[in-house]
Image (spheres, rainbow, N blue to C red):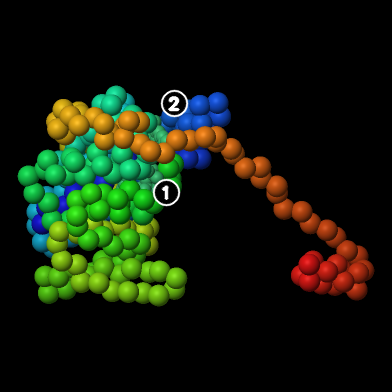
Amino acid sequence: MDIVVLVKVVPNIERVRFDMEKGTVDRSSAESEINPFDLNALEAALQIKEKFGGKITALSMGPQSAEGVYRDVFARGAERAVLLSDRRFAGADTLATSCTLSEAIRKLEHFDLVLCGEKTTDGDTGQVGNEVAEFLGIPSLYYVSMLGIDNGNIYATVELDGEKLVYKVDTPALLSVTKDANVPRLPTLREKLEARKKSVEIWDAEKLGGNTERFGAKGSPTRVAKTVVPKEEGRKGSIYRDVKEGIDALLSVLEA
Ligand SMILES: Cc1cc2nc3c(=O)[nH]c(=O)nc-3n(C[C@H](O)[C@H](O)[C@H](O)COP(=O)(O)OP(=O)(O)OC[C@H]3O[C@@H](n4cnc5c(N)ncnc54)[C@H](O)[C@@H]3O)c2cc1C
């Protein structure tokens, strides 16, 4: 089973600052890490590979400065890592990102499954997985909270609005997993040291056929008009010494 895992390197969202003038994330303000949801996708790929054999290719689009972080995918079970990095990919919205990722998947010799996280901690749109599937013309399942393997078949449980739907997965397909799908295992020190010896392949726009009109800012119909950080109002409390007065105040809030 040849599995492609989409992995995005994101800034640590607890620390990152925003450039309010440009309306962009100031990526230099915080260290980078693999998008936490993508670790669940990598773990799912590893579990499938353990049953079926095959190969995991991690695929990412982002700046080359993230190459060091990205090498962690080797320690987490990937045999191959491809980083799409080119100035012409910059400024991509989800459409251009998905188009670029899907062009790269087409360039791989073969794939059976594409796995991705449910969303990222920076962009947080949750659109890229389905858009990639659409570009590739393959079926996709979103919000997969459990993957089971039985009798050589893969079963995916999708949880939506309290309902659980179980699908038998035929390949090729794209699955987007939630953080409930598994607990990503931690790489050992040995795996981390081995990972340092491996190298990430860097692909540019030419490698993807060079149709730069569809990549980066040029291929992005979305424009960020303004970025606003909402004010946190904090919780407000009131103390009533008189019980009746307190109950009346509570009732008036509930009735309002
Ligand atoms: C007008 C506009 C301009 C933008 N300009 C920039 C910019 O200059 N620089 C910039 O960094 N961002 C920019 N962005 C943000 C960028 O569009 C998103 O970060 C990107 O499209 C991915 O969307 P997302 O993070 O919401 O992914 P989601 O849809 O939330 O992610 C779902 C899953 O898709 C996969 N995935 C998502 N992105 C990638 C990726 N890059 N590589 C591999 N797998 C991925 C992961 O598995 C992830 O878990 C811009 C957005 C807009 C609207």
Q: Position of residue 208 (x, y in %)?
A: 16, 34
Q: Nearer the viewer, residue 54 or 221?
A: 221
Does residue 76 appear anywhere in the picture?
A: no
Q: Nearer the viewer, residue 104 or 64?
A: 104
Mark 1 CB lies closer than 8 A to ligand 1: yes
Q: Nearer the viewer, residue 9 or 209?
A: 209
Left or right relative to 90: residue 231: right
Left or right relative to 33: residue 256: right
Residue labelled with disc 2: 28
Q: Ligand 1: which quarter?
A: top left
Report helix, strand or loop for mark 2. Answer: helix
Left or right relative to 233: residue 73: left
Q: Position of residue 251 (x, y in %)?
A: 82, 72
Amino acid of disc 2: Ser
> Residue at coordinates 37% horizontally, 58% vertically from top-left?
179
Amino acid of disc 1: Thr
Figure check: 98 above or below 224: below
Q: Which quarter of the picture shows residue 82?
A: top left
Disc marking residue 125:
1
Alpha carbon distance from label 2 to label 1: 22 Å
Mark 2 CB lies closer than 8 A to ligand 1: no
Q: Position of residue 38 (x, y in %)?
A: 32, 49
Q: Split into 4 quadrants, where in the image is the N terminus? A: bottom left
Residue extending farthest left: 109
Q: Nearer the viewer, mark 2 or mark 1?
A: 1
